[in-house]
Image: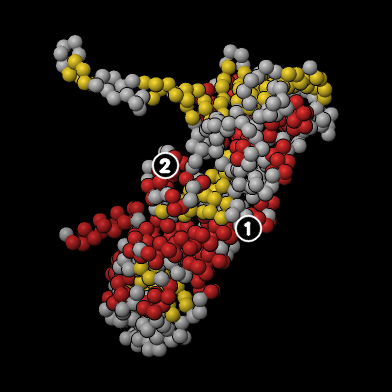
Amino acid sequence: MTKGSINVSVENIFPLIKKFLYSDHEIFLRELISNATDATLKLKHLTTIGESKVDYGEPKIEVKIDKEGKKLHIIDQGIGMTAEEVEKYINQVAFSGAEEFLDKYKDSAKDTGIIGHFGLGFYSAFMVADKVEIITKSHTDAPAVHWTCDGSPEFSLEESDKKDRGTEIILHISEGEEEFLEERRIRELLTKYNKFMPIPIKFGTKEINDPDFTPKTIKDKDGKETTEPHKKITVDDIINNPNPAWTKQPADLEDKDYKSFYRELYPMQFEEPLFHIHLNVDYPFNLTGILYFPKMTNDLNIQKDKIQLYQNQVFVTDNVEGIVPEFLTMLRGVIDSPDIPLNVSRSYLQADGAVKKISSYITRKVADKLKSLFNNNREDFEKKWDDIKIVIEYGMLSEEKFFEKADAFALYPTVDGKYYTFEELTNVIKAKQTDKDDKMVILYASNKDEQHAYIQAAKDKGYEVLLLDSPIVSHLMQKLETTKENISFARVDADHIDNLIKKEDTAISKLSDEEKTKLDKLLKEIVPSEKFMVQLEAMDSNASPFMITQPEFMRRMKEMQQTGGGMFGMGNMPEMYNLVVNTNHDLVNEILNTKTRKKQERLINQSLDLARLSQGLLKGEELTNFIKRSYEMIK
């Protein structure tokens, strides 16, 4: 037996490991399974190039719980270690065996999938164990060895009678860490971190129907025919899928395979994804993965943290902010890359050159996929637009390269259910919706029902009206106005239609200047000034007598403030509206010429309520009272 002290650069590294190495104690299982996987893949590589003469076979990793003995076993059938290798790789803390192996076989081993980035991974065992044993047999003829350490720098090393190659790690679970002796907890961790590890992981056994057994028809004691019970057999319970869809070539997968993998990733998600994007690049960085577009809501927050980040099939995190462009964090799926540094700050990630290239690549792939879907089946793309627009609009706002590419597939729907690209839209509206200053005015509504009267007024003039109702559309319009030439957006209820698209000709008012002054004074005395600014306009005599509008600039700035951005403080401003009064309407003339003040007030308030009703501003008790008054008038 050999005894000695582990070569560490501080007097006792174990308290540091327990407190600071990892924030979550549960991570130890990921580390030990990762080491076992490395050991197995190393052996596979050595047998492939002829440096090891053993039969590689179909190795697996086994996890066993000994609840009575308070022990957890992790057993692999990999490369194993000699006594010298235990001294080197275990007793010299922070020396990465995987990195040395990759360096030695760098030309032939680059595709072996060895993890090799976890450094002190083995010592994470001491976060949950007060004693750790290693029983290991090298793939060579060297004798097996047994290493023991009780959480101090002291260790013992002696020969073992282990006959099979590979390594068994035995953790003597510490007091207070007994949760790691519970089958449910270990299964949960294996599923979380090792669900897609490249080597099968056995965790106990399970009973299944014998596939070679064909049930016969038999008669029961009453003579009735029945089918005999299916024969059961006991098999290893393999808890992982060593060959997940993202590790395969797109040519080898069908649409049903992608949908099946989506259900594997999100077993509680019942809706099918809209479409997928398969990522696969090996230069200038390594990255594979599959991203899915789920059906979106207009909520920008609840969708996030659904993309899982892996490193060589080892789960790392589902917080991919800084790696995936923010607008794509609303998607779902998997990204796997050995080139993403682990256990570092988000600010470091965002400044890392490789991560920036990965982010740009993912953005480009998503844009190319969207363009392809649009070109190949525009009708289907239009049907899905409402479910994906929030991601595309967010991307246009936050990523300049995506904004440029989005011209080819971003859609602008109308209130009549037509869909235009930006170029198509401008070609359709250019002739009619260009104002006297040669600026093209793009009209839009955010609610077809509430803004129906305004939409109709625009359509009566042959204008096209878009339906733009996402929570970030105000930001997007601002972006388009600053990047496209000679265009502006105006919501149909921002003013009366002749003011929204001002032509050379202006309507003549039927009222004299004196009558207009009298009308203005009367309205301002009756209409609440804290809510409405009175605005007299000469319009077509068939247009509405009273119309409520909200200036485009003020309303848009408030909306932008509420979703982040815009002018400081405007989101908290009270709602202000313009009351546009049509001086050419007969009702306005009647109000002006009515002899009694009481009747004037009644006509103005009725007209104001009707205008508020058409704008959706009459609600609650005010709406109830309006209906009662209308009913009384009818009676």
| Percent of width and height locating residue 321 | 59, 50
* Point 65% across, 47% down: residue: 108
Seen at 54% across and 31% down, the residue is: 57
Count of numbered tags: 2
Q: For the N terminus, give its image quadrant.
A: top right
Q: Residue at x 20, y 14 (%)?
A: 220
User: Split into 4 quadrants, where in the image is the C terminus?
Assistant: bottom left
Name which residue type carries label 2: Arg
Q: Nearer the viewer, residue 508 or 335?
A: 335
Q: Is residue 606 left or right of residue 345?
A: left
Tell me the distance, in whole angstroms, between the alpha carbons under discs 2 and 1: 32 Å
Name which of mark 2 and mark 1 comes first in the sequence: 2
Residue appearing at x 72%, y 37% in the figure: 97
Mark 2 secondary-structure assignment? helix
Disc on res. 424: none
Relative to 363, residue 69 above or below = above
Relative depth, front residue between 373 and 627? 373
Locate residue 253, reporting x and y percent.
42, 49
